[in-house]
Structure formats: structure tokens, C-alpha cells
Amino acid sequence: MIKFFVLINLFYLIECFKLSRCLENLMCYNYPTDYTITSGRVLYPGKNGINHWDKYKISGPVVLPPNKNRNKWLMYYYGRDGTKWKGNYTAPDDLPSGYIGLVESKDGLNWNKIKGNKYKGSVLEPGEIFDNVHVSVSDVNDIDNKLLMFYSGGTEEKTIDHKTIGLRIRNLVAVSNNTKDWVSYKYPIVDINKYNSKYIFGSHVRVTPLDENNKYGKYIVTLHTLELRKNNTEAKFRIMGSVTEDRFGIYNLKNLDIILKEGEKDTWDSGGVGVRHIIKYDNIYYMFYSSEGRIDGSCKWCIGIAYSLNNGLTWDKLKIKDKKDLGGPVFEARYNLDAWDNYGVSCPYIIKKPDGNLRMYYLGIGKKEGNLTGAIGCAQTVNCDITNWVRV
């Protein structure tokens, strides 16, 4: 039996493969109850009201700090308000994709909703062709006083077992002049399955400029994909990437290679590697990545670190003091506590603070009374140590 560890923002993988219920990375659920320990939590389903687009599930924070053109923090994220995708298709309860929305903040910790002009206050909803069933935000970049949003879109096309809807994932781009009104480009920028059938899909494109001061230079473009192996008897989530000179990294990308794989059996990241965020820190490129592995006989969702010394061409997992496995983990759930993120952590998005410390926004997965819940949290480094994090 093939066991997939399906990453949060994506995608249910299918009855004929008999998926494991240990779903990789973005397990986001509605919020039925609260927890005793809520420190670090900054946004949760229903916080914006019962009539809002995100009252049922949320995931995938993408955060922009203030700059010379904007005096507030922005957070884009995705989710939905119920069990249905657009078109009245029933969405797998494990997948939080649906619509994309926006909140803003004065300090990056206390967030207020921004009412968009799309479905129930969202800012981007499914379109007509390549994203007509569900959407989820991957990354947002400031370019020439505009914002470029990289996002994933699913369609009603059936995949793998010729029954399941929503797994035909393409990666698209939209542009905005005012943070909440978006116009999507006509064609996808990445469509992995179109060029290589061993990749079931590719998702969560993130684009990092090699030179933060030159947005017209080279970019590191990454995504995660589900790769079929061993004559299609096994599948693993892996990270693909490329260094491109395409302007802003938005043109059709075909030559993406696997740059980071899962760990060995029984390591913390043996289940696959997925949603990631790359930053340049102390002149080294670091990749903070989500993974799931079998530890002590159970599934664990954690965050670890890889690094590149050659401008993103190749990557190695960081050797971390007092950790037996390469890469980490460096940030974990608060196991065995009545905390909102006591089951797993995933989907890191990293911001550099003026004092040299880093701030991480992440998906926290909790378990209470038999229910799994998902919310967005925030942590920061201690004494500028990228391997030592504390929740805010």
C-alpha cells in the first residue's frame, strides 16, 4: 500500500492509493473549542466573524512588513468558510484551500481584517480556467510599487484514480496596485505534470531574489511536488528549484530539479519535505522547510533548516547541535500540553527584524477532544540564533 504524506495546502491523494491519514503539512480544521495555552497564536478560523470567508479553515501565512510605501504589516493567507469548494464540489476536510484573504497590523502580531471585493470579503477567488475550483496563496513580492502574488489553483479535472477532483494543481500569478484588488495572468507559470508525468503536481511556488536590492536580477524559484518512484509504487513529497534570470521569476518554468529530499527511515523528515521559505541571512541562504516523519511510532509535523553556499544551486541540511538528524527539527509542537499547536507546526514564513532576529509565521496544528484544529502563529529567534525559537 502506498503511503503518501500529503502536505497541507494540497491534496488529498486518493482512494486508489489508500492514503495514510498522516497528512503532510497543512492539516487545517475548523475551531470547535479553545485551548488553555494560546500564546503565539495570532489568527484562527472565525476570528473575523461567522459571515467571513475564513470561518471554517485557514492556513499558509504570507507576511509583508512595512516599507517606504506602506506603514502597516500585511498578511495574505487562504482558507474557506465551509465544506464546499466553488462549483459545489465537496472539498476533502483535510485541505484548507478555497479562497485568499488579507489582514493588516500595526505590529505584525495583532491583526485586523481587510474586507476584499470577492467572495465574503476575500481578495482572490477561483477563476474560470486554470483555477476554477479552489485557490491558495504561495508568496507575495513587492515589485515596482505593485504586488505580485504567486498562488496555486485547482480545477475540476480528475486525476490519478479518474475520480478525485482538485488535485490538478497549477501555479499562477496575479498583480495588484492596492493590496486587495488582483488581476490574474492568463496562463500558469508552472505546470509540473504537463511536462513530466512522474510528478503528480507541483505547488506552493516561492520566489526569492538573489539580491534583495535588485528585483530585476536572478531569482531562486522553489516549489514542492509529489514524485512517483519505484515503478509508481511509492510517492514522496520533495522540493524542486531553479535559479532563473526570468524577470521576477514569473515566466513559464520547465527546468526545475529536485533540490531537497526526505530524510532516511525513522528520521524527523522521513515522510517528505514540502512548504518552505528561503531568506539570505549573514550572507548565507537558508531554507526553513516543513516536514513530517515517523518518530516514536507517531506522525510529527516539524520545521527544519537547509542551507546553500552557492546562491541556491544546491542545498544541504544543517547540522544542528544536540540533534541526531540533519536539518533539525528546530521548531516543534508543544506536545502533551493543552496548547493550540500541540500536534504539529508547518508552513514557515520568515521575516528579518531590524534588531537582527528573525520572526516566523507558521501554521499550528492542535488536537483537543479528538478534533484537529489549525491556526496561524508567530515565533521569533533568541539572540539571533536561527536554531532557537520562542513563541511571541
Image: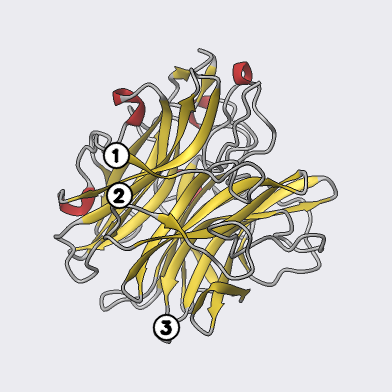
Residue underneath mark 2: 221
Image coordinates for residue 179, horizontal then vertical, percent: 33, 60
The residues bearing labels 1 and 2 have C-alpha atoms spaced at a distance of 9 Å
Looking at numbered disc 1 in the image, what kind of residue is underneath it? Answer: Leu
Bin the neighbour count of mark 2 within 10 Å (Cα to Cα): few under 14, some 14-19, many 20 and up: many
The tag earlier along the polypeptide, 1 or 2, is 2
Image coordinates for residue 246, horizontal then vertical, percent: 16, 48
Residue underneath mark 1: 256
Residue ranking furthest to the top: 162
Relative side of 247 to 42, left or right: left
**C-beta proximity under 8 Å, tags 1 and 2:** yes
Relative side of 187 to 91, left or right: left
**C-beta proximity under 8 Å, tags 2 and 3:** no
Q: Secondary structure at mark 2?
A: strand
**Viewer-proximal residue among 129 and 49:** 129
Residue underneath mark 3: 356
Looking at numbered disc 3 in the image, what kind of residue is underneath it? Answer: Gly
